Amino acid sequence: PSSGGPILSPPQSYSYEEIWDLYSSVFTRFVLAVGMVHCFTEYVAEITLCEGPSMHPTLKPSGEIVLIDKFTLNRIHGRARRRNDHDVAIISQGEERLKRALQRQEAFEKQQLSAQNASGNGKTKSLELVDEWHEPRISVSDIKPTWSMVWQALTSPLSVGDVVVLEHPNRKGTVCKRVLGLPGDTVLRPRKGLLIVPDGHMWVEGDNPANSSDSRTYGAVPMTLIQGRVLCRIWPLRGNALLMRGAPPRPEEGRGRSAATMGYTILPAGYEGQHIVKTVKKNPASTAT
């Protein structure tokens, strides 16, 4: 007789085929998810935690989480085995960088000379009067970050001024440094003489030279050690998060301007004593008439 309570149905039984289909579906989706995450972090982008004082003040000594771009780096450098890859040749070979720098310098001097002659009331000036290097080296302390600069970095090869994460050349682990020299560039090393960055290598230093172990310690490092280019800081949420391409930040007030606190001087390939612009040029204010 019915007691008026809920009627419990017998537990549903599953066949072996249904159980197999369920577990195989879950396992397949799990494998696909793991594979997608692995491919994304290996070839597209990755989030990593930076620890240590070497990149201060760009990055704090602890708790800084940054986004690393790997896609453009793999797109450019992952094809290094192809000897006819022109982009790779320009980046990794000092001779090619020297030729490109001289071509750009010649074009820059002609452009500057034309502008001077146009504003010189018809007085023709000689090319020797143009004594400026075509590529400025402006500190990131003076650069106002924009998303167009980020896009330019993403669509251009590895360049001097980029912040990268790379494997340590002498031990396990990774380090975060700024690229200051590429093949063909000249490093002025106090008490050690000049060094030409060899092909396939780069010169990296921390933004805090007084507390950084970098190329000044272990020399130029192979480009193959690069894991990615740092785009921005994800955490903590403070100030400007974009890590711009440029010369290292100026030292904090009160610090001496010695080799230990300023790092080494690196001269670009093709440099012949021209003036290198290190400050942002201001356009003269126009006067309304």
Image: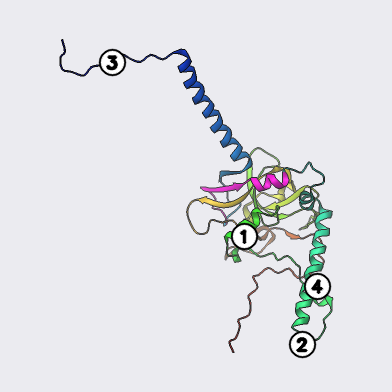
Which is in the foreground here, disc 3 or disc 4?
3
| Residue that label 2 marks | 121
Q: Helix, strand, or loop for circle 4?
A: helix
| Residue that label 1 marks | 149
Q: Helix, strand, or loop for circle 1?
A: helix
Residue 15: percent from left, percent from top? 44, 13
Three-letter code for the amino acid on which mark 3 is drawn: Ser
Question: Mark 2 or mark 3: which comes first in sequence?
Answer: 3
Mark 3 neighbour density, 10 Å: few (under 14) some (14–19) many (20 or more): few
Q: Helix, strand, or loop for circle 3?
A: loop
Q: CA distance from mark 1 to mark 4?
A: 26 Å
Q: Are marks 2 and 3 in contact (CB under 8 Å)?
A: no
| Residue that label 4 marks | 110
Question: Mark 1 or mark 4: which comes first in sequence?
Answer: 4
Q: Are marks 1 and 4 in contact (CB under 8 Å)?
A: no
Residue 263: percent from left, percent from top? 69, 58
Question: Mark 3 or mark 1: which comes first in sequence?
Answer: 3
In this picture, which residue range is highlighted in magenta? 58-77
Up/down of 127 relative to 49, above or below:
below
Residue 112 lies in quadrant: bottom right
Three-letter code for the amino acid on which mark 1 is drawn: Met
Q: Is residue 63 left or right of residue 274?
A: left
Which is in the foreground here, disc 2 or disc 3?
3
Q: Helix, strand, or loop for circle 2?
A: loop
Residue 116: percent from left, percent from top? 76, 80
Quadrant location of the C terminus in the rendered image:
bottom right
Residue 33 shows in the view: yes
